[in-house]
Amino acid sequence: MSMIMAPLVVSAVSTVLAIIITVVDSIVNNYGEVQIDINDSKRVLKVNGGSPLLQTLSSQGIFVPSACGGRGSCGACKVKVLSDVGPHLPTELPYMSKEEINANVRLACQIKLKKDIKIYLPEELFNIRKFKGIVESLKDVTYDIKELRIRLIEPNEISFKAGQYVQLVIPPYENIKELTQRAYSISSSPSDKNHVELLIRLVPGGIATTYVHKYMKEGDVVEIVGPFGDFYMRDTNADMIMVAGGSGMAPIKSIIFDMWERGITNRNVWYFFGARSKRDLYYVEMFRELEKKWEKFHFIPALSDPLPEDNWEGETGLITNVLDKYLQSVIPNENSKEGYLCGSPGMINACVQVFDKHGIKDVYYDKFA
């Protein structure tokens, strides 16, 4: 066989094998029509089998929370399964408690629909909607965080609790061949029902953040799904100790300005915002102005690694150390306290340890996936 013919033969064989694999896969994995029975037949869906439960429900207008868009890395899309779909997968177990495993709670993104299934969903999920909007503004608030403001057009109003989040739908681009969804906390106030504002930090290699920072532009039509989440202000009289960093500003900003607008100014609010250097700070003047009007609101930005040119005169060090110092010697002890946190798992875990040290047990958080 000539040196020219050999590669051609190999290529032909590879093509034939690829065709055979495709045909076999379509036969073996052709599950036909399956039925999804939701909440004891309150709603019954007949769908094509073979896809994950999460995406299938979404295609039917039922949106289960998923901070990671179905990658199996957030553990948010928990669904109680009432029929046998096999044992828990290794990808599910890290996100499950013993009680959830015993109750057959599963991750909807990890369940492939191969046969009829019965599930239970909380009633509030039936009120989750998909919204279409126009990018009204897209501006830099730091070198790596953009403020995305969306004007809703279909429907043109949204109702949510301050602190909740939506899933931003990212269209295919470059090597991304499918629609992608990622969760982002709403930073705007619930009083503005016609807009949704998001704070999106650029993550190297991030599908959604890369699109927003490099491809999205004002005037684009976008879709969001929501609202989701149970991170919101609890109706108590406790002092609120709030901590955030980076784009974790979003839900905290929404909660604080919602309180101000509704006249809930009787509670002491201490907001600690951690950044590395001055270029990572934003909205400082906004919160300083609020401090002047709201006697019980306190804004404490802190830099962990200020640069000489920053000329920083505020708090320095890790935000957890600043938090510990204030709880120990600045914030009065007589009132009960609640913690509200938004940021990376590491920051949140460290803050919880500080709260625990000071006897603060009621802690609510929005942890990045």
Image (cartoon, rainbow, N blue to C red):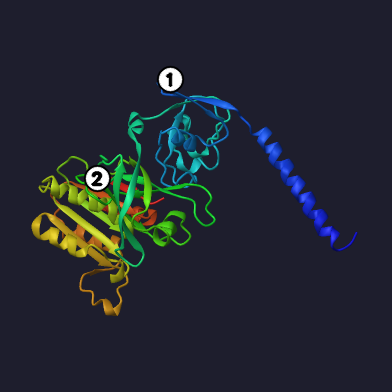
Q: Which residue is mark 1?
A: 41
Given the current orientation, which residue lies at the most extreme right position?
1
Q: Would residue 114 be found to the left or right of residue 123 on screen?
A: right
The three-letter amino acid code for the residue at tag 1 is Ser
x and y percent of residue 201 in the render? 37, 59
Which residue: 40% across, 21% down?
42
Which residue: 52% across, 39% down?
110
The three-letter amino acid code for the residue at tag 2 is Asn
Q: Which residue is mark 2?
A: 194
Q: Which label was assigned to residue 240?
A: none
Question: Which of pointers 1 and 2 indicates the residue nearer the eye?
Answer: 2
Q: Is residue 41 above or below residue 201?
A: above
Q: Would residue 36 be found to the left or right of residue 62 on screen?
A: right
Label 2 residue SS: loop
Label 1 residue SS: loop
Q: Is residue 40 above or below residue 131?
A: above
* CB under 8 Å between discs 1 and 2: no
